[in-house]
Structure formats: C-alpha cells, structure tokens
Image (spheres, helix red, strand yellow):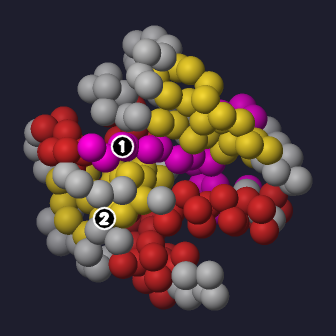
Amino acid sequence: MRRINVTEFVSVDGVMEAPHEWTGEYFGEDVGQFKQEELFASDAILLGRVTYEGFAAAWPSRTDDDGFADRINSLPKFVVTATLDELEWNNSKAIKGNIAGKVRKLKEEPGQDVLVYGSAQLVNSLIPMDLIDEFQIMVFPVVLGSGKRLFGNGIDKVGLKLVKTTSFESGVVVLTYQRAGNE
C-alpha cells in the first residue's frame, strides 16, 4: 500500500505562503539533495488547485543536471479541484468529488509514495479523513509575521509522533511526523 506524504516549507511562525519569496537563501546543496531524494522516493504527486497552478506555470520549462525537473514533470499528478476542467501540465488528472474515496483508492494502488507539496487547503481536508501518513515539515529560520498558515482554524486536535529530525547547515530543520498510533 502506498503512503501519502505531505512535504511543506514553513517559516518558524508557521507561514507557508509563497515560499519562493523567502526560502532561497536557505536552500543549499544539502537541502536540494534532501528534496531530490524525497521526490525520487515517490511515483505520484497529489496537489490542490492553487499549488497545481503555480507548479504548472513554473516546472514544464525548467531543466537541471540532477534530473529533478525531468522527474517532477514526468510523474503522474493528481489535482483535487472543483473548478479546473482542463489540466495542461503533462500527466495531470483532475480529482473531483468523493475526494476521500479517490485518495484511498490511490493509496491502495501499487507503487511508491504519493507526495503532496504545499496545497494547504487539500492537506487540511485530508487530515480529518486520516489519509496522511507522514508530514515532513521543513522549518526555515525566518519569521514572516503574516501570511497563510499551513494548519487552518477549525481542525480538530490531531496527535502526531515525531519520527525523525534532519537539520541542515543553513538552519533549516525537517521535522518528520506520523499520526500518533500510526506505525
């Protein structure tokens, strides 16, 4: 059975909005290698509409020597959306209606992990459905003061268990959590 793994860039004060504006100075080779390994441990991506639109505007034209761009562009992408009818980024498929059932079915398919980038609204909707297996919260050493937070108001308490920490030279720390009771 596949796992749904959420990976997020957040500031120390919990902001996840527009990470392209505040993560760059902390993104060294070690962070890049971590993100590379994370992507290559997955064989599908699950995105919300807003994150999909940002990625679809940026990634198709990118190239790199490490194969990250080729990998992210070629992987199947599943987009939870109520509004998009046509998805132009290659290998993208819309998920509409019965999100819980369709994500459960995706988890039941054989393969590697399914990676969720960003997509705060989607993440917040999957939490009460108990569909997220792991959270990799990359905390960047910056306080932004305002912006969209990863975990929104109205989520019931969810117990998490810290299973791993990884720190990088730039001060970025990855906190890897699973739901308490999920082994």
- 7 within the magenta span: yes
Residue at image coords 11%, 43%: 97
Q: Quadrant of residue 104?
A: top left
Taking 62 as reference, is 119 left or right?
A: left
Looking at the image, residue 170 lies above or below residue 178: below
**The magenta stretch spans which residues?**
1-22
Q: Position of residue 65 (x, y in %)?
A: 63, 88
Q: Which x, y percent locates residue 138?
A: 66, 44
Label 1 secondary element:
loop
Left or right of 93: which side holds 115? right
- Residue 179 pos. (x, y %): 46, 23
User: Residue placed at 62% from the left, 48% from the top?
Assistant: 9
Q: Is residue 86 above or below residue 16?
A: below
Q: Tell me if residue 153 can be seen.
A: no
Q: Nearer the viewer, residue 145 or 115?
A: 115
Front one among 132 and 54: 132
Across and down, in percent, residue 154 comes to: 40, 17
Residue name at image x 72 percent, y 32 percent: 13
Quadrant of the rendered image containing residue 38:
bottom right
Compared to residue 56, the image places residue 78 above or below, namely above
Asked if one can make out residue 48 in the rendered structure from this viewpoint, the answer is yes
Q: Which residue is labeled 1 in the image?
A: 3
Image quadrant for the N terminus? top left
Task: Look at mark 2 in the image and give the residue it sits on.
Answer: 77
